Each structure stands twice: as C-alpha cells, then as structure tokens.
Amino acid sequence: MKILVLGIGNVMFSDEGIGVHITKMIEKNYTFYSKKHTIDFVDGGTLANILIPTIVEYDNVLIIDCIDADDGKIGDVYFFDYNDMPKMINWSGSAHEVEMLQTLQMMEILGDRPETKILGVVPKRIEPLSFDLSEEIQKAVPLMEKTIINHLKQFEFEIKKIANYSVQDIADQFKKEQYDN
C-alpha cells in the first residue's frame, strides 16, 4: 500500500503553514520502515487541485491543514475520516487559492479519491510574510504529532525517532531558505 502524508498551507503566512511545517517535522524527526507499505511526505503548499495527479497515485492519504470549526478555539485539533467529516468543520477562509475540500470533492466525483484522513488545527494568525507560529499552534503540535504517529502505526510501520526538530525550527528553516537565496 502506498501512503501519502500531505502537508497543506502557505508557509509564508504564519499559522497557515502548519500543515507543511508539521509534515516536514515528522519526516525529519522519524524513520519509517515497512516490508509491505511505502510512505511519502509531500509539501502540497497551496496547490490543491494541481495535486490531484499526485494524490491519485496513493491508496491512503493523510492531509494536514488549517481548518475552521464552529465553536472551535485557536489550537483545537481535529482528526477525522473525509467520509465522516463533522458538519462543524470547514476549510474556508484559508490562504489557498482553491480549497483542499473542493479538490477532494472533485476527486470523489471522478472516483479517484483514495481513502483520506484529515488532521486539522484552528489557526490564530494568518499574517503575510511571517514565519512565526503562534504559541497556541505550537502547543497543539504534540497532539498532532502523536495523532500522526498513531495513525501511521496502523500500517505496521517500524517507526523510530531520530531527531528533535520543533515545528518552529522547520518554519525558521523555510524563512532562511526564502531570504538567503
């Protein structure tokens, strides 16, 4: 089985980039081994529907992104199956051109959507040209990390922690790459 961990968000808009940052953090901090399955970590940025050819290559997808939720507080974490998306969840108001929800709906209509889980967090700041993550988002990261690892364990990966990069370390690396080139 081919598994995709897909981080969505604009890394240059503070908390809006959490999906990408935590995906990169997991990729740097852990190794994954399986005789039966493969896993890829992809920075999906704000590409949404342009990602369709990539997403259809996988059997199982975990999408990590900012979300909004009725009565949700900043830093609240939600994990759900796309087919059982709570009615209080939406992805509107992010800095994406085409929302990931619409992309998944297009794929579903075409019969191309793989099994999909979503891990979302309510952001505090969506500020242009800021790589600083809010304290609330940083406090949500341990739960998000644990949720990701537990989800991937169901595929019988041997998972080993090899580093301790923080999500802000990853955001700072994006900032350095952006401004040092």
Image (tube, grey):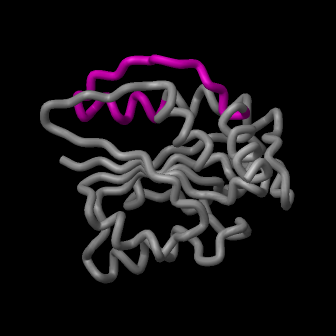
Residue 28, placed above or below residue 181? above
Q: Nearer the viewer, residue 53 or 144?
A: 53
Residue shown at 71%/41% (left/top)?
171
Q: Nearer the viewer, residue 12 or 65?
A: 12
Kindly tell me whether residue 58 is visible in this rendering: yes
Answer with left or right where residue 161 lies relative to residue 40: right
Task: Check if residue 54 falls in the magenta segment.
Answer: no
The percent position of residue 176, horizontal first and vertical second, equals: 75, 43
**Count of numbered circles in the view:** 0
Answer with left or right where residue 14 lies relative to residue 104: right
Residue shown at 52%/54% (left/top)?
43
Residue 68, placed above or below residue 133? below
Task: Check if residue 162 falls in the magenta segment.
Answer: yes
The percent position of residue 118, horizontal first and vertical second, equals: 47, 51
Looking at the image, the residue that sits furthest to the left is: 36
Which residues are drawn in magenta? 147-168
Q: Quadrant of residue 172?
A: top right
Q: Quadrant of residue 33?
A: top left
Residue 26, placed above or below residue 160? below
Looking at the image, the residue that sits furthest to the front is: 181
Kindly tell me whether residue 71 is visible in this rendering: no
The percent position of residue 66, horizontal first and vertical second, equals: 65, 54
The percent position of residue 36, horizontal first and vertical second, equals: 13, 36
Residue shown at 39%/72% (left/top)?
52
